[in-house]
Image: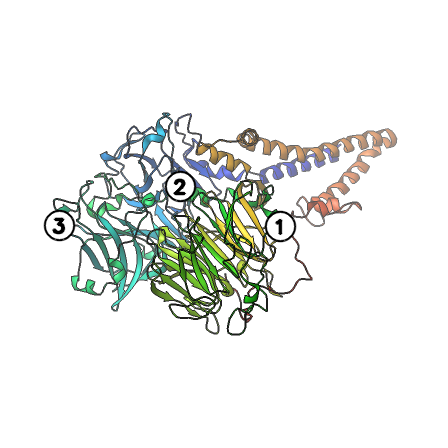
Amino acid sequence: MAGLINNLLILLLVFQNSCLGFKNPLSVFKRYKDTTRSLSSECLGNNRPVISLGLTDFALDIRMPGVTPKQSDTYLCMSLRLPVDEEAYVVDFRPQASMDTVHHMLLFGCNIPSSTENYWDCDEGICTDKSNILYAWARNAPPTRLPKGVGFKVGGETGSKYFVLQVHYGDVSAFRDKHKDCSGVTLHLTHQRQPLIAGMYLMMSVNTVIPPGEKVVDADIACHYQKYPMHLFAYRVHTHRLGKVVSGYRVRNGQWTLIGRQSPQLPQAFYPVEHLVDISFGDTLAARCVFTGEGRMTETHIGGTASDEMCNFYIMYYMEAKHAVSYMTCTQNINPDMFRNIPQEANIPIPVKSDMIMMTHEHHHEETKKTDDSSSLKQPKREEEEVLDQDFHIEEAVDWPGVNLKLGQVSGLALDPKNNLVIFHRGDHVWDRNSFDSSFVYQQRGLGPIEQNTILVIDPSNAEVLDSTGKNLFYLPHGLSIDKDGNYWVTDVALHQVFKLGVRDKEPLLILGRSLQPGSDKNHFCQPTDVAVDPVTGNIYVSDGYCNSRIAVFSPNGMFIMQWGEETSVGKAKPGQFRIPHSLTLVPEFGQLCVADRENGRIQCFRSETGEFTREIKHKLFGTELFAVSYVPGGLLFAVNGMPYPGDIEPVQGFMMNFSTGEIMDTFIPVRKSFEMPHDIVASEDKTVYVGDAHAKTVWKFTSTEKMEHRSVKKAGIEVQEIKEAETVIEAKLKNKPISTESSKKWEKHHMVEQASSGISFVLITTLLIIPIVVLLAIAVFIRWRKTRVYGADADHKLESSSGRILGRLQGKGSGGLNLGNFFASHKSYSRKGFDRLSTEGSDQEKDEDDGTDSEEEYSAPPPPPVSSSS
């Protein structure tokens, strides 16, 4: 009997240690203040502002406490104390706002908020001490992202103890139903020391006077930099109504390097510095604001009211932690003569579409505290942030009948002002190896022009043909674009021309290039690939082409303005070099033109006004070729690549990217048929995407769908499978969006499980551990009962021996720990198959092993040498 008791004690100790091993990692977060807050019942967000994200990280939910602004241009503030005393680092921001209700939000860090109320009118002030801008969000602007390893330091002895949220409610017509708003931002903080500390540098003019009626007035700011190196990654401009353009530069040894340039009438967000700029001891920081006094009857001075003006250039930077300074200012002009050499671009106003102009009504509390002006700022938009959330996935609309349209080789796609899909195809003509000679002269003129209508207008919902045109005009259609007035702009690689066509006009309204004559001067093209028309200036951009390597720019009436680009040199392609500039897309918000540099497998972006190179987007997933690119207002970039060459592994697919960061957010392929040569892509603001394929002679429609994905995550060193379904429903509720009944029920069920997660987890683990113990106890009791009956007094010794063998298997040889693997492996029927890690990777299509050939289209491009793709 004593042996049985000893064995039971051992089993109980094993059970106790196992249970302790499953301690909930969230319990380490108990040291944080378990605060709750009172929110309106209409605000379905988390009423606990502090959310544990593990042993060292936590989230802080900063929200308006259910407010209803009563008049337009209302600025409301609220504060939240940092829930820890020790140092922490803000490493990410997630806005929780909708452009339908909020114009912009600013987040400040300080130690003494201006009020202790739940919220207050910001006219009372933001903070009573110095405040630093940490984050800004505004409609129609890209999100602010901190580089990896960079954080804003808060808490501790020197960091801010409070966060103050300022929300600008521009047009309050959305509050006619008297609903309450809980907009705000969720911060991701960590206790892990960050190697790089973020800070803010403010350049501000304090003595500029704008005379009435004066056409151009410059406000210049310049300061010597005399601290440790800092690295710039974002900038923001700010003026009131009279500001036309604000530019900031680093001046080193007489060389001016652009930090950022933007119209202050666009959403005044932090925009990414396109090429990281470092500032060292001895450099000069310079900025210029360009104003106009036209329309004013009196002098305009720097001040805080709507009738005053301001000239501010904000720079977000990071420094090494040991040298970090969180806030710096510059309010003087140490060398007025140096501005004689400022780049000419600083004097050129940036055109702004009327629907992009943000409200410029400014309150005195906004950006007026002189050197402590970091206490205000206007910021990026939630529509873009909604777009950039990974809560959706691009998938084929499998019920769309457009894939069954009878088409020729599909070369171009566009959307007209009514959002109808327009297709440009080649009818019964085909581009093959016999189409051109070695001088790029078209060899099949005897076929005559295409007799079918080459331009089809398609209903996006049911794929019905609404209109058609383009009969007997073209030989080999290629690129298609539609301007703001609905005119069609097309290229023909056989004719070497660009055409402007009115919807109802039988003859072209404008023709660029000489028919059937390839060339490279301002009057000729050589197989032009695409065309784009600036919606503001009307300038025409032509990518030229298969046998030229340039972008040519023309005025609205067809006068040549300029060109840029050159053929790719041997080795790695340099900025501004092309190997078939194949597709164009304008990015009006940033004043840029992006080019699909096909054979270099990359996207290059340039300033549309000057042709200055701004950035390259290149990923290994692109493979060798990148065929087409399309920008969606709000910050999304879509692209398609080409079929891989023999030996390449990157599949042909579509890409959705964040324009601001260049990162790939999603990839997509069709379900019906397969991509063969996806030649063009176009996307709408609702994330509907169309892809046209020249070889498959097909157009696919893709739409965004809510994401329900299994993702592998690691918590406390344990790999688990997590379903993200609840996130979609929760975010929808936070944004007051309709939710399907099924999704709601699933979320409520998930939520109840979450609430009882610790208890259920404990019960489940306990049950699983008790079952084998109970079985063992039952076996032991049964054996003892049988042994007692059969062997009498000798049973104790035999039972102890039997129990010892069982424990020996559980513990393993030479080990005092529990080893269930050894125990189960001792049985012949044991297999590890059911315990293998689940694979979350898969493919929806197989590669045709027999098809190793390259495209038969566009033979005029010489075969590319093997190049290594970089991401």
Looking at the image, is mark 2 or mark 3 earlier in the sequence? Answer: 3
Looking at the image, is mark 1 or mark 3 earlier in the sequence? Answer: 3
| Quadrant of image for the N terminus | top right
Q: Residues within 10 Å of mark 2 (few under 14, many from 20)?
A: many
Which label was assigned to residue 554?
A: none
User: How far apart are the two marked residues, 1 and 3, measured between alpha carbons?
Assistant: 65 Å
Of tags 1 and 3, the one toward the viewer is 3
Kindly state the secondary structure of the residue where label 1 is placed: loop
Location of residue 446 (image quadrant): bottom right
User: How far apart are the two marked residues, 1 and 2, measured between alpha carbons?
Assistant: 32 Å
Which label was assigned to residue 211?
A: 3
Location of residue 81 (image quadrant): top left
Q: Tell me the amino acid under the disc marked 3.
A: Pro
* Depth order, front residue of 41/479: 479
* Depth order, front residue of 647/514: 514
Q: Tell me the amino acid under the disc marked 1.
A: Glu
Q: Answer above or below: position of 606 versus 372.
A: below
* Depth order, front residue of 556/550: 556
Q: Say which residue appears at 55% left-offset and 46% top-offset.
A: 701
Q: Which residue is mark 2?
A: 382
Left or right of 218, for residue 691 = right
Q: Tell me the amino acid under the disc marked 2.
A: Arg
Looking at the image, is mark 1 or mark 2 earlier in the sequence? Answer: 2
User: How far apart are the two marked residues, 2 and 3, measured between alpha carbons?
Assistant: 38 Å
Q: Which residue is mark 1?
A: 841
Q: Say which residue appears at 64% left-offset and 51% top-offset.
A: 673
Q: Residues within 10 Å of mark 3 (few under 14, many from 20)?
A: some
Of tags 1 and 2, the one toward the viewer is 2
Residue 545 at what x, y percent from top left? 46, 65
Residue 397 at what x, y percent from top left? 57, 43
Q: Are marks 1 and 2 in contact (CB under 8 Å)?
A: no
